[in-house]
Image (spheres, helix red, strand yellow):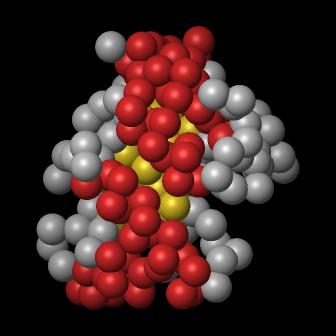
Amino acid sequence: MHIPDPPLLVITDRRQARVPLEAMAAAVFAAGGRWLLLREKDLVPLERIAALQRLCALGRSCGATVAVSTDLTAAQVAGVGVHLPAGADLVAARRQLGGAALIGCSAHNLVEALRAEDGGADYVTLSPVFESASKPGYGPALGVEGLRAVVHELAIPVVALGGIGPEDLRTCLRAGAAGIAVMGGIMRAEDPGAAARAYLAAIV
């Protein structure tokens, strides 16, 4: 299964966001972003499902892919894909969501990435490539060579995550990353649409 095009995964964090999540998503979609992951793990399940459905409605208007982090029930109710933490039961997730669902998995090293691939993940996010202000303490940073080494061993797409600004994006792509994931670079932006455009321009 292919990851969305353009391969920029925007991960939400309403605590960092300068604007409400729906306004942020609308700005990202208007800028050309087509892949959004709702990560708000602290929301109660019904609130998460409601937020996911609102974001999906925005995404449908422009053909964007919206997914949810961890919550298989929300993914099933909304009919979307899911992104799971390292070590999650990917086989059970696939059984619950079906073969057409886009299922990703987090990885922080080669062992976790290979385990996700063997479990049937469609893609992995690999982090942190660089030091991340959004998730300090996750590390050590893998660097471009660490990213390259993992990409070399995997057949599924590797999406680089962690401290990646527009100026770093092409370096990660040249190292073999199939896409880039970003949280703080868009969540903390005063103009998330402009921030998304800067990332997207670096992909082309």
Q: Position of residue 36 (x, y in %)?
A: 43, 50
- Asked if residue 108 can be seen in this view, the reply is no
Whole-percent x, y for residue 66 in the image: 36, 57
Which quarter of the picture shows residue 142? top right
Against 172, residue 21 (above or below) is below
Residue 95, x across and y down, in percent: 24, 86
At horizontal 64% and vertical 72% (from top left) the residue drawn is 41
Q: Is 18 situated left or right of 154 in this image? A: right
For image coordinates 69% across by 31% down, the residue present is 189
Name the one closer to the observer, 87 or 34: 34
> In the picture shown, does residue 125 fall above or below 106?
above
Vertical comparison of 80 with 145: above or below: below
Q: How many marks?
A: 0
**In the image, 111: left or right of 63?**
right
Task: Identify the residue at horizontal 15%, vertical 68% (top origin).
Answer: 100
Horizontal arrangement in the rendering, residue 137 relative to residue 85 (left or right): right
Q: Nearer the viewer, residue 40 or 192?
A: 192
Q: Position of residue 134 (x, y in %)?
A: 75, 45
Q: In this orientation, which residue lies closer to the viewer: 131 or 192?
A: 192
Residue 127 visible in this rendered orientation of the protein: yes
Quadrant in which the C terminus is drawn: top left
Quadrant of the image occupied by residue 166:
top right
104 over 70 or under it: above or below:
above
Residue at image coords 57%, 62%:
39
Q: Is residue 95 left or right of residue 199?
A: left
